[in-house]
């Protein structure tokens, strides 16, 4: 009998250890930063810092911020639109424009600082306001970062407001239907500029 109790207790401890490791691994996956390098589909945004390297041209190798108007300032080329482009697309633009001054410009573009991924959480959460995110974040993660629900929150009437071109899209979400697995797709991956309203 004593041996059985010890075995059962050991089994519970092992199970808890496995669960702790699983949750830790999941948290690592959640905060894994995006890869804003050349092969990425990341879209450059206002406030990001771009590192531009031009091979054998140290005077043209530098870090530049993306201004509020979505442009960067670059030697020889003055102002260039950058917001909304991927690093590869901006690389192509720079290489093409630099051909006026260099025979075969070899350009590398990297996003050294991601500052444009902002979402807004308002209503019945502990801390309202803007969240500056460094990785892809879903709805429940954003609510957690805002401190969670207040005691008065209507958890099944959450609304996500999203710009879709020139239109404002309104997406209604139910917290319970996400948790019970009936509508897991409602746990949206948030996009820059999204506003989460918890009534």
Image (cartoon, rainbow, N blue to C red):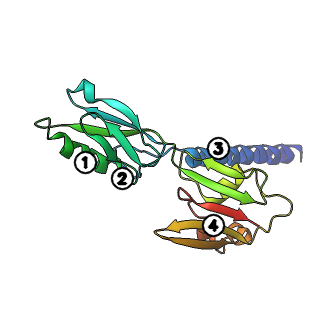
Against 54, is 123 above or below?
A: below
Residue 48 x %, y %: 46, 42
Q: Residue at x 29, y 33 (%)?
A: 53
SS at circle 3? helix
Q: Which residue is mark 1?
A: 93
User: Which quadrant of the structure image shows residue 162?
Assistant: bottom right
N-terminal label among 1 and 4: 1
Question: Of tags 3 and 4, which is closer to the observer?
Answer: 4
Q: Farthest residue in the right direction?
A: 1
As drawn, the label of residue 175 is none
Calculate the distance from the C-alpha at mark 2 to the C-alpha at mark 3. Answer: 34 Å
Q: Which residue is mark 2?
A: 85
Query: Mark 1 and 2 residues: CB-CB less than 8 Å, in contact?
Result: yes
Are there few (<14), some (14-19), or many (20+) residues within 10 Å of tag 1? some
Are there few (<14), some (14-19), or many (20+) residues within 10 Å of tag 2? some
Query: Mark 1 and 4 residues: CB-CB less than 8 Å, in contact?
Result: no
N-terminal label among 3 and 4: 3
As drawn, the label of residue 24 is 3
Are there few (<14), some (14-19), or many (20+) residues within 10 Å of tag 3? few
Q: Which residue is mark 4?
A: 160
Calculate the distance from the C-alpha at mark 1 to the C-alpha at mark 4. Answer: 35 Å
N-terminal label among 1 and 2: 2
Q: Residue at x 14, y 36 (%)?
A: 101
N-terminal label among 4 and 2: 2
């Amino acid at each position: 009998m004593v041996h059985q109790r010890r075995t059962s207790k050991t089994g519970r401890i092992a199970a808890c250890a496995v669960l702790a490791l699983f949750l830790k691994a999941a948290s690592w996956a959640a905060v894994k930063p995006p890869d804003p390098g050349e092969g990425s589909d990341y879209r450059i945004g206002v406030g990001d810092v771009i590192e531009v390297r031009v091979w054998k041209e140290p005077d043209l190798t530098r870090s530049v911020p993306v201004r509020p108007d979505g442009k960067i300032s670059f030697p020889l080329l003055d102002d260039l639109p950058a917001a909304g482009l991927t690093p590869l697309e901006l690389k192509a633009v720079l290489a093409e424009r630099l051909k006026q001054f260099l025979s075969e410009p070899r350009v590398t573009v990297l996003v050294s600082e991601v500052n444009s991924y902002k979402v807004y959480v308002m209503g019945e959460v502990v801390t309202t306001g803007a969240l500056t995110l460094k990785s892809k974040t879903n709805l429940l993660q954003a609510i957690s970062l805002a401190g969670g629900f207040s005691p008065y929150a209507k958890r099944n009437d959450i609304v996500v407001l999203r710009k879709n071109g020139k239109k404002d899209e309104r997406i209604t979400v139910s917290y319970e239907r996400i948790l019970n697995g009936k509508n897991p797709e409602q746990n949206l991956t948030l996009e820059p500029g999204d506003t989460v309203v918890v009534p």
